[in-house]
């Protein structure tokens, strides 16, 4: 404790630690100079955060022992720690310095970072082969089962089966959990049999003959959908085979059977068509070793606690009102507050990066969607048209055609380029009811869309700026580990080979400029241009597809977009689609699960809550609330109808970062007994100083876990006692 020139005692909150979610200072990449063209994603921390400097803490300052339960006592009389507490601390320190000789401190094993299909080719082979083994086991146990498809997926695999109705009962077999146990036992026997996995190339006619011989009608449909030659078949020993392009392990014995688990059975329509047969889908997971399976199961347990659908209801953030229709989001006040903060930050960051914010209509004449090609290629994802004055209008599934019309509105010069237009545009896409999932898959959502129209010579630098902005924005929300993929020209594409080559080189050059490692997906680009995709890693290691940067050679051609070059000729501009969040709804869901609903101070819908212990101080609490609101701080005053302990629990369950008890002493002294959700009781502080610190922390996107130095006016203190 020290005294300043005015006689005011300055108390430092030495019992708290600065925790930073995302700093306002510019962040940068760790130096990575090698580009990876291997079959795995690069995952690495992208940013190094720098802290907002706080005032120095006095070396003689003592921690404040006032608790929130002692709010109505004189906090200045409780500054010194009780003698018993000091003795306990000394005893604990002595034990730590001289541990018992016969005991070795336990060393906690580092968490396992789960591999992905992209990062581990052998894992992909394990999952693909395990899918075949499961299908074989099902047909061994239930010969009437007909096979359809069985791909690998993130974290595992599945296979779809059709069980024809019994001729007598007209009922189909329904698989149960006990059936899964029997299937797994049969799979273990197949794995232990050490059957070789063998590829065979056959003609289309031979493949058809074999499929018809087996009586597999769904496989015939799959065969007819394969447009390339020749046809490949993969055999599991001499006992079972499937149409397949691979890859697989060399032998079933290479499958670690204890790292395989069948998880559930679900229904699925063939080809996703409600008019077709209902299939039974068995989901499974497979890993390189048992430890990975255990880590995955632990992750699933944690994911269940973080489910945004459960937390969205518990924290009153949003709802899906079935009376209004599935997949349509209703944003409640608290969720709306967070969304507004996200959108305001997005707009500010884009404006500072040289973007202009635009707004476009929600519907347009169907002719626009015919010009863009969406009516031909995306019709299944669009809602039905509506009649307007004998013309057909379409509610928009995309924003990009509108931006093309704006560009075409006047003749452009090369001197005008680039144009960077950003829009938080709400779009509507048809999704089958069975595919809807909380905020992750909805029918109406807001894209954080932007389009860049530039010269070919500007393309690489524009991509670099997009990646830099993406890094800045995602880091602000605590996401600093990404998986990056560059996808190139597919077999079917529009535009010349030279345009594709130049654009791909620009994307590669941008990644090289950033020093980012990436995986090359040969032939994985969109038909209209190459692209860069970013997946973010959340707090429990899951990957989420969010950001994308895509070149487009299609729309400029379809809309006849032009600029006048320096030579006076009319040329096509380069067009870049890009999104950072993907959609506000989906990113919000990811953010809820990443934080488990415990939002950082700057995002929390309620940052600060006042807990009155008596009706006599409610008016004072309202006065503090109004003062905080004028400073942009989101404050609530508890109704005060519950006892203090219940008020505190309610605030903690609502995940409010900071709260303060207000009694008669606080009202008379103008101070508040402060409690941090993360650290507990912090002590009593002057209102103005507390509000200024809250505002500063929120503006800098840091946690309210330090107060720097807060000046607290106190009575004269006996120096001998200090």
Image (cartoon, rainbow, N blue to C red):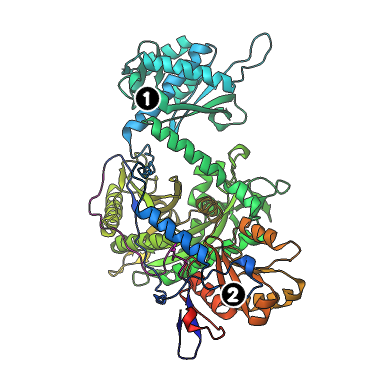
Contact (Cβ within 8 Å) of mark 2 with mark 1: no
The mark found on residue 641 in the picture is none
Q: Residue at x 66, y 58 (%)?
A: 650
The mark found on residue 256 in the picture is 1
- Name the dominant secondary structure of the magenta segment: loop
- Pick the front one: 413 or 178: 178
Which quadrant of the figure has residue 339? bottom right
What kind of element bears circle 2?
helix
Q: Tell me residue 151's x, y (percent).
A: 44, 29
Crowding at mark 1 (Cα within 10 Å: few <14, some 14-19, many 20+) = some
Give the extent of the magenta segment: 14-37
The mark found on residue 75 in the picture is 2
Farthest-out residue, bottom:
6
Q: Tell me residue 264's x, y (percent).
A: 55, 28
Farthest-out residue, left:
34
What kind of element bears circle 1?
loop
Crowding at mark 2 (Cα within 10 Å: few <14, some 14-19, many 20+) = many
């Amino acid at each position: 404790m020290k005294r300043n020139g005015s006689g005011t005692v300055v108390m430092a909150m030495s019992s708290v630690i600065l925790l930073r979610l995302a700093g306002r200072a510019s962040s940068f990449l760790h130096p990575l100079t090698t580009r990876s063209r291997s079959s795995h994603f690069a995952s690495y921390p992208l940013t190094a955060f720098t802290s907002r400097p706080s005032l120095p803490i006095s070396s003689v300052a003592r921690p404040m022992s006032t608790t929130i339960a002692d709010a109505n006592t004189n906090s200045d009389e409780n500054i010194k720690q009780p003698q018993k507490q000091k003795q306990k601390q000394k005893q604990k320190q002595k034990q730590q310095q001289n541990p018992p000789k016969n005991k070795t401190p336990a060393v906690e094993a580092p968490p396992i970072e789960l591999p992905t299909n992209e990062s581990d080719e052998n894992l992909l082979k394990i999952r693909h082969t395990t899918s075949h083994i499961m299908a074989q086991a099902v047909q061994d146990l239930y010969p009437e089962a007909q096979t359809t498809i069985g791909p690998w997926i993130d974290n595992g695999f599945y296979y779809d089966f059709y069980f024809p109705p019994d001729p007598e009962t007209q009922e189909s077999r329904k698989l149960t959990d006990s059936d899964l146990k029997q299937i797994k036992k049969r799979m273990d026997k197949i794995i232990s049999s050490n059957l070789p996995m063998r590829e065979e190339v056959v003609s289309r006619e031979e493949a058809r003959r074999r499929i018809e011989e087996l009586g597999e009608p769904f496989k015939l449909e799959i065969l007819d959908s394969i447009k390339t030659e020749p046809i490949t078949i993969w055999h599991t020993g001499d006992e079972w085979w499937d149409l397949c392009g691979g890859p697989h392990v060399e032998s079933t014995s290479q499958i670690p059977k204890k790292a395989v688990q069948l998880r559930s059975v679900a229904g699925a329509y063939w080809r996703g068509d409600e008019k077709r047969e209902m299939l039974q889908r068995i989901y499974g997971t497979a890993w390189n070793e048992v430890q990975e399976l255990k880590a995955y199961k632990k992750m699933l347990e944690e994911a269940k606690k973080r489910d945004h659908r459960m937390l969205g209801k518990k924290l009153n953030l949003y709802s899906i009102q079935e009376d209004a229709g599935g997949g349509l989001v209703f944003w409640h006040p608290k969720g709306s507050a967070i969304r507004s903060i996200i959108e305001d930050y997005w707009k500010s960051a884009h404006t500072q990066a040289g973007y202009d914010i635009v707004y476009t209509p929600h519907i347009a004449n169907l002719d626009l969607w015919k010009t863009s090609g969406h009516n031909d290629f995306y019709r299944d994802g669009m809602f039905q048209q509506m009649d307007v004055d004998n013309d057909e209008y379409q509610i928009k599934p995309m924003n990009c055609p509108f931006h093309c019309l704006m560009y075409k509105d006047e003749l452009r010069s090369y001197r005008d380029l680039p144009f960077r237009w950003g829009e938080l545009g709400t779009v509507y896409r048809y999704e089958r009811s069975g595919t809807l999932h909380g905020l992750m898959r909805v029918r109406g959502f807001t894209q954080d869309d932007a389009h860049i129209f530039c010269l070919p010579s500007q393309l690489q630098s524009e991509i670099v700026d997009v990646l830099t902005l993406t890094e800045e924005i995602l880091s602000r929300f605590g996401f600093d580990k990404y998986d990056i993929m560059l996808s190139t020209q597919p077999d079917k594409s529009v535009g010349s080979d030279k345009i594709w080559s130049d654009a791909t080189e620009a994307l590669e050059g941008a990644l090289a400029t950033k020093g980012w490692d990436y995986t090359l997906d040969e032939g994985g680009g969109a038909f209209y241009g190459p692209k860069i995709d970013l997946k973010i890693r959340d707090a429990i290691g899951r990957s989420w597809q969010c950001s994308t940067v895509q070149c487009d050679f299609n729309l400029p051609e379809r809309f006849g977009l032009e600029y006048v070059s320096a030579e006076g000729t009319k040329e096509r501009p380069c067009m870049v689609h890009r999104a950072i969040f993907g959609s506000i709804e989906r990113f919000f869901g990811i953010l809820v699960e990443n934080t488990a609903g415990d939002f950082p101070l700057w995002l929390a819908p309620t940052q600060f809550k006042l807990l009155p212990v008596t009706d006599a101080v409610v008016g004072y609490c309202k006065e503090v609330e109004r003062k905080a609101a004028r400073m942009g701080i989101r404050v609530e005053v508890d109704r005060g109808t519950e006892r203090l302990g219940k008020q505190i629990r309610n605030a903690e369950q609502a995940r409010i970062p900071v709260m303060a008890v207000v009694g008669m002493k606080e009202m008379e002294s103008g101070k508040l007994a402060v409690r941090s959700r993360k650290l507990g009781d912090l002590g009593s502080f002057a209102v103005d100083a507390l509000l200024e610190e809250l505002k500063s922390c929120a503006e800098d996107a840091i946690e309210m876990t330090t107060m720097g130095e807060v000046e607290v006016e106190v009575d004269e203190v006996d120096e001998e006692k200090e």
